[in-house]
């Protein structure tokens, strides 16, 4: 009985040991399979310098509000970002203020026309009166000349008196002729002044009518409508112009950028400036189209750093990249990233950046095998923000993205 009992105990111990070993292997396999991994791939590795920025247009046409029109208020606008054709109505302003101004100008025109007509009528009446008076004096001169012609048949005294009366009549006629010319010139000057006032009032009426027609602003060119910032409430509260906003006469409300002149403007850190040069290839990744990279090249780089308005403030270079071909979906203001290709490594082995670990200052990766993760020493050839090119690893090898042994070694060191 003792032998049988001992044998049964041994069998039970063997079964328990086998179950524990199977559970350990199974739990280890589950743990290993749960860790994130990646496959090393072989191919051309592009060494890049990333630059974050946005799309800007080098050429654009400003859309301005009408001049000298009081109380300008937007009552309708075309949709921001909408494509427009030259001549399309894009802005409408409230015409009540301009209409009131037109009524005032028309009233002033009517008053000027009435004053001009009255001045012309008064000048005509005065001229006729002066001509009648001149005719009367001319008749008196002729009568005096007739009396003088009788001096041979009248007394000497009467003849002398006739000559005196003739001189007086001639003097009066000369005075009246001068008065006629003076009054005529004065009336003509007054009429000319009133006519100038009338013409000015008429021009202002025509200008007011033209301004009313300009209360509907048309697109000056083809493009995409983009509204400018309204700073009437201060820089901190600035927002793009919208319906209901009051606008200063003649101020710029919107702009229509030329989509053919779109460029990517990005911030280039000073530490990366020496690696970037004009004509280098660029891959532009825009936030609205994350799966579609746009090809281009570096067009220009600012010679000096520029201050930004972010917090904390910093200074950086500005790099401009041109597109190989403009996509119709692109719009100014789209944010994104431009990857400048500064070098190319042919037939390189690339893995995610997170797959490279460091031990004693030397890089290594954890190759995933059936027996567990095996450390493999590698040499880093180039590093990008998301991936790294290495030497010492075969293509197709699966590598771990987390070093599960780091915590254990740290605990053991304590």
Image: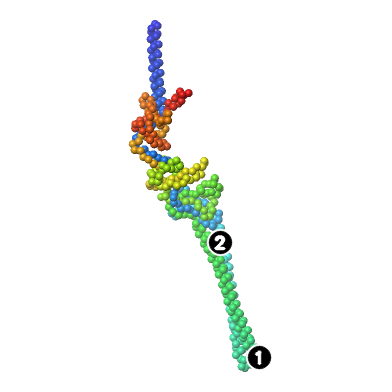
**Going 60% across and 90% down the picture, which residue do you hit?**
149
- Where's residue 199, x and y in %? 53, 66
Camera-nearest residue between 209 and 287:
287
Camera-nearest residue between 348 and 368:
348
Label 1 crowding class (10 Å Cα cut-off): few <14, some 14-19, many 20+? few
**Going 53% across and 50% down the picture, which residue do you hit?**
245
- Disc number for residue 179: none
Q: Quadrant of residue 146?
A: bottom right
Q: Is residue 311 above or below residue 248?
A: above
Q: Earlier in the sequence, mark 2 or mark 1?
A: 2
Residue 242 visible (yes or no): no
Residue where numbered disc 1 is placed: 157
Query: Of the residues tagged 2 and 1, which is closer to the observer?
Result: 1
Label 2 crowding class (10 Å Cα cut-off): few <14, some 14-19, many 20+? many
**Going 57% across and 71% down the picture, which residue do you hit?**
189
Q: Residue furthest bottom?
A: 153
- Where's residue 400, x and y in %? 40, 29
- Where's residue 205, x and y in %? 53, 62
Residue 326 visible (yes or no): yes
Camera-nearest residue between 279 and 11:
279
Q: What colour scheme governs how the chains and residues are painted in the rendered image of this protein?
A: rainbow
102 relative position to 11: left or right: right
Residue where numbered disc 2 is placed: 105
């Amino acid at each position: 009985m003792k032998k049988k009992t001992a044998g049964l105990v041994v069998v039970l111990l063997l079964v328990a040991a086998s179950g524990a070993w199977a559970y350990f292997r199974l739990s280890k396999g589950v743990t290993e399979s749960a860790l994130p991994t990646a496959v090393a791939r072989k191919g051309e590795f592009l060494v890049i310098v990333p630059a974050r920025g946005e799309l800007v247009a080098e050429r654009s046409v400003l859309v301005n509000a009408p001049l000298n029109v009081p109380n300008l208020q937007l009552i309708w606008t075309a949709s921001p970002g909408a494509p427009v054709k030259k001549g399309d109505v894009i802005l409408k302003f409230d015409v009540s203020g301009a209409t009131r101004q037109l009524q005032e100008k028309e009233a002033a025109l009517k008053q000027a026309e009435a004053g001009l007509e009255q001045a012309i009528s008064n000048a005509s009446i005065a001229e006729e009166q002066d001509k009648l008076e001149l005719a009367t004096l001319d008749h008196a001169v002729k009568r005096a000349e007739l009396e003088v012609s009788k001096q041979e048949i009248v007394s000497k005294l009467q003849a002398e008196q006739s000559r005196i009366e003739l001189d007086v009549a001639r003097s009066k006629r000369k005075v009246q002729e001068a008065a006629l010319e003076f009054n005529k010139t004065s009336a003509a000057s007054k009429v000319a002044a009133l006519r100038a006032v009338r013409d000015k009032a008429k021009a202002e009426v025509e200008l007011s009518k033209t301004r009313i027609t300009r209360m509907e602003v048309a697109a000056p060119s083809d493009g995409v409508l983009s509204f400018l910032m309204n700073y009437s409430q201060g820089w901190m509260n600035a927002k793009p112009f919208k319906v209901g906003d009051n606008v200063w006469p003649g101020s710029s409300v919107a702009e229509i950028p030329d989509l053919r002149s779109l460029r990517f403007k990005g911030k280039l850190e000073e530490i990366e400036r020496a690696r970037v040069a004009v004509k280098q290839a660029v891959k532009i990744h825009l936030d609205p189209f994350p799966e579609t990279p746009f090809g281009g090249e570096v067009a220009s780089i600012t010679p000096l750093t520029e201050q930004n308005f972010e917090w904390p403030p910093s200074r950086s270079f500005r790099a401009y990249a041109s597109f190989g071909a403009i996509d119709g979906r692109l719009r100014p203001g789209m944010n994104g990233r431009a990857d400048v290709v500064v070098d190319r490594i042919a037939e390189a082995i690339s893995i995610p950046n997170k797959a490279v670990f460091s031990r004693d200052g030397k890089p290594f990766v954890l190759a995933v095998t059936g027996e567990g993760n095996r450390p493999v020493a590698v040499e880093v050839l180039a590093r990008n923000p998301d991936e790294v090119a290495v030497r010492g690893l075969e293509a197709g090898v699966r590598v771990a993205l987390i070093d599960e042994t780091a915590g254990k070694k740290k605990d053991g060191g304590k």
